[in-house]
Image (cartoon, helix red, strand yellow):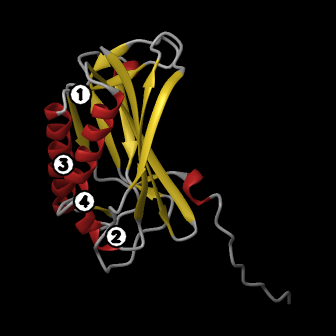
Amino acid sequence: MALFHHRITGASPGESWSFGLYTEGAGTLEAAQAGWVAAQAAIWTDALDAIVSTEVTVEELSTATITQATAGQIARVAEGSALAGVSASQMLPFQCAVSVSFTTQSATRAGRGRLYLPPLVASTLDDGRISSAAQAIIVSAFNDGWGALATAGLSPQIYGRTSHTLTPVTGGNVGDVIDTQRRRRNKLIEVRSLLTPP
């Protein structure tokens, strides 16, 4: 079985975002990339894109084969993407992100993982939290994405960067509290308004 590291990278006005996922499978690198592309199409098309602004785009989808014992990259393929949000609503601030958490049979911290979505639109909020309707859209989108990965013979994994062990993902969840990813706004040039001293 081969270990693959998949990544999706995208842009929002003046900033960038990304997340990744490890999978294990018996196929080739090219087949794993095709599975990743299909999974992202399932996640975005008529699903996640409905709660993401048109200002948020996907730029690249990539897959690399990884040496499990060292985390070293063996080979990598990548391609551009036309996926993007379709909502005309205003997006949340760049650093505001919803976390998709992954669980395994292991009860330890090493048995959990997560990824952070690009900023959603402000209309997904309900009293400062993500609405149950938006949560349902995200859950459905990722269930479809997992289905596409399974069809491609890919099994999502939590990869221990220090232990170099693999733990199969057995579940997941989406919370209703906005998280903060400060690195997603560190390239913004801030416009400041000056105070007038007394």
User: Which amino acid type corresponds to the residue marked 3 in the rendered image?
Assistant: Val
Q: Residues within 10 Å of mark 1 (few under 14, many from 20)?
A: many
User: Which amino acid type corresponds to the residue marked 2 in the rendered image?
Assistant: Val
| Label 3 sits on residue | 139
> Which is more N-terminal, label 2 or label 4?
4
| Label 4 sits on residue | 48
Query: Which secondary structure, mark 2?
Result: loop
| Label 1 sits on residue | 154
Tell which tag, 1 or 4, sits nearer the viewer.
1
Residue 37 in sight from this viewpoint: yes
Residue for point 34% across, 65% down: 84
User: Which amino acid type corresponds to the residue marked 4 in the rendered image?
Assistant: Leu
| Label 2 sits on residue | 121
> Which is more N-terminal, label 2 or label 1?
2
Q: Position of residue 98 (x, y in %)?
A: 36, 52
Instruction: State the CA–CA distance, disc 4 to disc 2.
Output: 11 Å
Instruction: State the CA–CA distance, disc 1 to disc 2.
Output: 31 Å
Q: Is residue 135 left or right of residue 182?
A: left
